[in-house]
Image: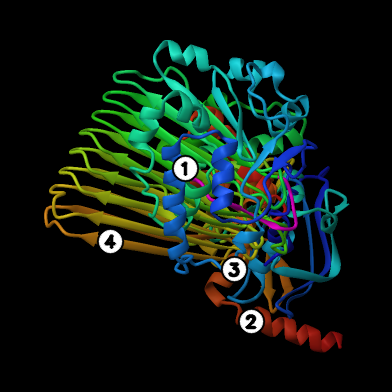
Amino acid sequence: MIYQDSKTLLDVRGLRATVNGIEILKGIDLTVKSGEVHAIMGPNGSGKSTFAKVLAGHPAYEVTGGTVAFQGKSLFDLKPEERARAGLFLGFQYPIEIPGVANSQFLRLAYNTVQAQRGKDELDPLEFDDFVREKMKLLEMNPDFLDRSVNEGFSGGEKKRNEILQMALLEPHLAILDETDSGLDIDALRVVAGGVNQLANKDNAVVLVTHYQRLLNYIVPDFVHVMEAGRVIKTGGKDLALELETRGYDWVSAEYRAGAGARA
Amino acid sequence: MSSVLQNLVNQPYKHGFVTDIESDVAPKGLNEDTIRLISAKKNEPAWLLEFRLKAYAQWLKMEEPKWPNVHYPTIDFQSISYYSAPKPNKKLKSMDEVDPELLRTFEKLGVPMNERAKLAGVAVDVIFDSVSVATTYKAKLAEVGIIFCSISEAVHQHPELIQQYLGTVVPVGDNYYAALNSAVFTDGSFCFIPKGVKCPMDLSTYFRINTEASGQFERTLIVAEDGASVSYLEGCTAPKFDTNQLHAAVVELVALDNADIKYSTVQNWYAGDENGVGGIYNFVTKRGLCKGINSRISWTQVETGSAITWKYPSCILRGENSVGEFYSVALTNHMQQADTGTKMVHLGKNTRSTIVSKGISAGRSNNSYRGLVRIAPTAAGSRNYSQCDSMLIGDKCGANTFPYIDVRNPSAKVEHEASTSKIGEDQLFYFAQRGIGAEEAVSMIINGFCKDVFQQLPMEFAVEATKLLGLKLEGSVG
C-alpha cells in the first residue's frame, strides 16, 4: 500500500555487480518506501535473483558500481549478518539444507540475535517454543518441523513455508522474497501469500521477485518492475503484471530499445 | 574458498606454555642400559625388567608401520629422552606437597584438582611428563575396594594384579609402538574395580608432556571384575615446541562377566603451527578385551590435537553377548594428519558392536577413518553397525574412509553407512542472512554433526569438547 507519510527504506542508484568477472547487474535504480509492495519480474537470466542476492551480500557477487542506501545508511558498509540484523530479509529461492542442526535451534538463535540487536528480550527454549508454535499456525505448519534438521528432506513447499516462518519471526523492515512462489501448489501458494499479507504493514516493505503473475493475484503489488539484461526497463502499477501475463516480455523489450534509440 | 572460511581455524594453542620445573631427564638414546636405568629409577621388580627387555628385543626386530595414510620424516629413536620426571622426585603424601609451579600449570590447564577436584567429584591422576604426580580421592575409593593409582605404585602395591593382566590385551610384540612402549613406559594409571562394585564417580587422568625432546610413554591398565562398572576420562595437553615429540601410549582394558567399562578421551596435544612445524606424534595402542559374558566396553574419543594421530581403540569381543562401542570425533586443521578408527573383533556368540565416527577436516589437513570389523567363525549371530561421516571445511583438506570388513560366519549381520558433507559458502550465507555470524554458524553445524558422539561423553567433558572444537576452528571460516 502507498502511504503519504512513508519513509524511504531502500534506495538503489546505478547498481552494478559481477560474478566471476561477468557483469550481471548493469545499473539498477529502485526506490522502495515503507508500506509498499514491489514486484520484480522479467525473463530468465535478467538478473532478478542476482539483484536479490547482491542486496543481501552474497559473497559470490562483487559490487562494481552504484550505491544502495538501506534506512539511510550505505548497505555496502554492512556485512551480510549485519544487514540481516538491521532488518533486511531474503527469502531464498532454494533454501539451504543444514543437516544436524535442529530447525528450532536455528530459528531461536536467529530470532534472539535480531532481538538482541533491537534491544528486546531474548527467549529461552521453552518460551520460544510457545512463540514459534503460534507463528507456525499462521502458515499451517506441522510443529514436527521444529525437531527436524533445517530444511533437510523438506519438500519444496515446506521449505518455502519455513522461509516465511523465518520472516514472521524476524519481522524484517524489508523482505525480499526470491521466487517464493516457485514449486508451490495452489493451496501452499494461498497459505504462503496469506502469511506475507498478514506480515505486511505500513512500516515495512516487501519486494517480490517472481516469474509469474499468479502470485500477484494473492499479494497485490503497488509497483511492478520489469528487468532485462541487468537493468529495470519498465515500471508500472499492478496492471502491468496482467499485461505481461497476456502479452509476454517482448513488447516491453522492444519499447525499451526504441526508447533507448530515441534517447541516444 | 571465501576469506570467511579461511579465518576460523587459526586460534592460537592456549596450552602452549612451558612450566619452569626442573626435570630429572635421562640421557637421550635407547638401548638395554636405558631400559635398565628406567627400571632401576623406578625400583622395579625383576619380572618387570624382564617384560621390558623382552619387548625391546621384539621391537628391535620390527619395522615402523608404513600403512597409515600419514607422512612424516623418519623418527630418530636415539634422539629422544625416555625418562623425564619433575624434581624433586620424592613420594608425595598430599596435594600440599606438590610443587606450586606444577599446580599453577594444572590451573592453567583447567585441571580440576584440589578443591576443584572435590567440587567436581572427579578422582584425578595426573601424569606430568612421565611421572604420576598426584592421585586424588584414593582413600575414598579404597573404601569400596577400588584401586586407582599410578601404575608404578601398583607395581609395588599390587604386583599380583599387574602381573596377571599387564600385556594380556596388548602383547609386548603387538605392534611397533606397543613394543616400544612396553620396553620404556615410565608411568600411567592403574584402575581395578572389584567384583560387583559400581565405581561411584568418574575416574580421570590428565597427561601432559612438558619437556622438549622427551617422549611420553604411559601405560594404562583398567580391570573391571564380574559385575563391576567404571567410567574413565582421559585428557591430554602439551606445550609448544618447534620439534616433534613422540607420544606412544598403551591402554589395556579388561572386562570380566557382566562388567562395563566406559573410556572417554579428549585429546588436545599440541598440533604444531599452521605450517606444520612442531607438534606431537600421537601413536597410541588402545584395546579392550570383553573377556566375560555380557560385558561391555565403550570408547569415546574427541581427537583435536597432535601433528599426527595414529590410533585405533579396539574391542576384542570374546565373551558371549558382549558389546563393543566406538564413538569418535576427529578434527584436523592446518597441516594435521589423522589416521584413526577402531577394530571390532567378534569372537563370541551374539556379540554386538557399534561404530560411529565423525571426521572433520579443515585447513590443509588430512583425516582418515580406518576400521576393521572381523566376525570370526565362532561368532554366530553377531552384529555390527558402522557409521562413518566426514565433513570438509574449505577446499584444501582431505578425508578418507578405509573400512575393512571380514565376515566368517553366515549368521552375522554387518551394516556400514558413510557420508561426506561440506560446510559451504551457501550454508554460511544462509546463516548470515538470518543474522548469525560465521563462527557461530560453524560451531552450530559442527556440534550438530558431532551430536551422536558428544551425547556419549560425560556432561563435563561434553561441554569441554564442544568448546574445544569451537576454539580449534576459530578463524578457519571467514
- Distance from label 1 to label 4 (Cα)? 39 Å
- Distance from label 2 to label 4 (Cα)? 66 Å
Q: Chain of mark 2?
A: A
Dominant SS in magenta: loop
Q: Chain of mark 3?
A: B
Residue beneath disc 3: B74
Q: Earlier in the sequence, mark 1 or mark 4?
A: 1
Circles 1, 3 touching at the beta carbon (< 8 Å): no
Point out which mark residue B405 bears. Answer: 4
Residue A11: x and y in percent read 82, 58
The residue at the point 53 percent across, 73 percent down is A246
Q: Chain of mark 4?
A: B
Residue B470: x and y in percent read 64, 44
Dividing the picture into quadrants, the one containing residue A67 is bottom right
The nearer-to-camera label among 4 and 3 is: 3
The nearer-to-camera label among 1 and 3 is: 1
Q: Chain of mark 1?
A: B
